[in-house]
C-alpha cells in the first residue's frame, strides 16, 4: 500500500530526528501518561508505533514488560540502540492495523502522535480492541483536526505538504464514533494547544529549499482567521512557531 510505503520511507530517513525532536522527546504529555494510568509491575504494555521510543522509555520502569512496535525497521533498530540500557522492552516490527499478537494479551495499550499516519483508523481501533484485555486501558494521544472544515482542511493540507507520510488528522467526534463502535469507552480526556517550533518542525521531514518554501508560502498566505486559530507567529517575514490541537484520551475496554 502506497501510504504505508511512504511511512516507511519517511521514518527510515528521519529516524534520528524523532529521537531528538523536542516535541516527541520532551512533550508535557509524557509525564501526564503515568499520572493517568494505573500501572502495576505485573502488567504487559503495548506501545503502538513507538517511533523514537519515548513512551516505552517513560513507562518501562512501572510495568513488567513493554512491547514496542513500529512499521519501520530502520526506526525500530535505531530506537532499540537508543534504549539499549533498558532491559524490559521488546522491539517488534508490526503494522498498527494488523498486530502480531493473540487476543486479550495486554493490560495497557498506548499510541502517541502516530495515528494520523494510519490509512485505515478503523482497522487500528479494531486491533486495539482485539489485543486489549477486558477491563484493560488504552491511552491515545494524537494531533486532531477541528470540527470546522476550514481549520481541518488547512492543517491536513499543511501536514501533507510537510510530511508525505501524513494521511489525515481526524476530529475527536470521528475517533469517538470509532471507539464506541468497538466497545471502547472514553473515560477521561483533555484537549490542548501544542506548541511547535517551526524550524524544527519543517526540518524534521523536508530537505529541499523549494519544498520548505512552498510550506512557508502556504502558511503566510493563509486567511487571518486561520492564522489566529493556529496562533501562527511571524517575525520579520519568518514563521517562528504555531500551535496545533492535540487530544489526550483515556479509554477503557469494558
Image: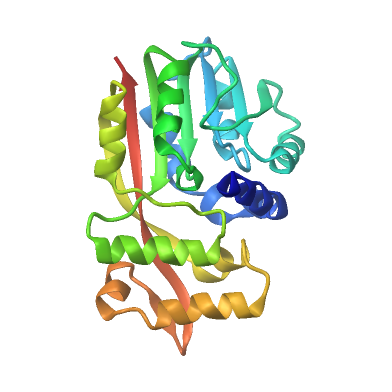
Looking at this rendering, what residue extends furthest in the front direction? 1
Please say whether residue 137 is visible from this viewpoint.
yes
* Numbered disc total: 0
Q: Residue at x 54, y 24 (%)?
A: 46
Instruction: Pick the residue in front: 238 or 217.
Output: 217
Location of residue 31 in the rendering, given as x and y in whole percent from the top left corner: 45, 38
Left or right of 62 on screen, residue 170: left
Please say whether residue 185 is visible from this viewpoint.
no
Locate the N terminus by quadrant.
Answer: top right
Q: Residue at x 50, y 75 (%)?
A: 215
Location of residue 83 in the rendering, given as x and y in whole percent from the top left corner: 71, 35
Q: How is the image coloured?
A: rainbow
Residue 173, quarter of picture: top left
Residue 124, quarter of picture: top left
Left or right of 150 on screen, residue 128: right
Location of residue 134 in the rendering, given as x and y in whole percent from the top left corner: 37, 10
Left or right of 57 on screen, residue 196: left
- Whether 197 is drawn above or below 32: the answer is below
Looking at this rendering, what residue extends furthest in the bottom direction? 236
Left or right of 12 on screen, residue 145: left
Q: Residue at x 66, y 55 (%)?
A: 17
Location of residue 135 in the rendering, given as x and y in whole percent from the top left corner: 34, 12
Instruction: Pick the residue in front: 3 or 137.
Output: 3
- Whether 245 is drawn above or below 183: the answer is below
Locate the C terminus by quadrant.
Answer: top left
Q: Residue at x 60, y 75 (%)?
A: 211
Amino acid at each position: 500500500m502506497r501510504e504505508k510505503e511512504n511511512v516507511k520511507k519517511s521514518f527510515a530517513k528521519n529516524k534520528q530526528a524523532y529521537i531528538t525532536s523536542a516535541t516527541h522527546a520532551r512533550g508535557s504529555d509524557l509525564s501526564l501518561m503515568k499520572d493517568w494510568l494505573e500501572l502495576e509491575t505485573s502488567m504487559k504494555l503495548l506501545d503502538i508505533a513507538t517511533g523514537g521510543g519515548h513512551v516505552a522509555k517513560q513507562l518501562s520502569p512501572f510495568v513488567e514488560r513493554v512491547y514496542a512496535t513500529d512499521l519501520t525497521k530502520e526506526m525500530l533498530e535505531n530506537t532499540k540502540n537508543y534504549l539499549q540500557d533498558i532491559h524490559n522492552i521488546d522491539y517488534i516490527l508490526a503494522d498498527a492495523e494488523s498486530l502480531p499478537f493473540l487476543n486479550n494479551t495486554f493490560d495497557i495499550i498506548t499510541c502517541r502522535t502516530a495515528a494520523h499516519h494510519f490509512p485505515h483508523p478503523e482497522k487500528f481501533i479494531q486491533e486495539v480492541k482485539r489485543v486489549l484485555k477486558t477491563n484493560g486501558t488504552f491511552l491515545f494521544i494524537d494531533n486532531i483536526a477541528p470540527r470546522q472544515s476550514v481549520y481541518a482542511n488547512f492543517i491536513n493540507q499543511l501536514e501533507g505538504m510537510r510530511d508525505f507520510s501524513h494521511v489525515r488528522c481526524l476530529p475527536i467526534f470521528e475517533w469517538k464514533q470509532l471507539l464506541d463502535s468497538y466497545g471502547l469507552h472514553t473515560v477521561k480526556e483533555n484537549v490542548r494547544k501544542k506548541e511547535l517550533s517551526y524550524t524544527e518542525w519543517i526540518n524534521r521531514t523536508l530537505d529541499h529549499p523549494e519544498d520548505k518554501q512552498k510550506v512557508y508560502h502556504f502558511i503566510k498566505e493563509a486567511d487571518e482567521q486561520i492564522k489566529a486559530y493556529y496562533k501562527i507567529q511571524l517575525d520579520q517575514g519568518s514563521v517562528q512557531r504555531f500551535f496545533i490541537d492535540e487530544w489526550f484520551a483515556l479509554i477503557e475496554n469494558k
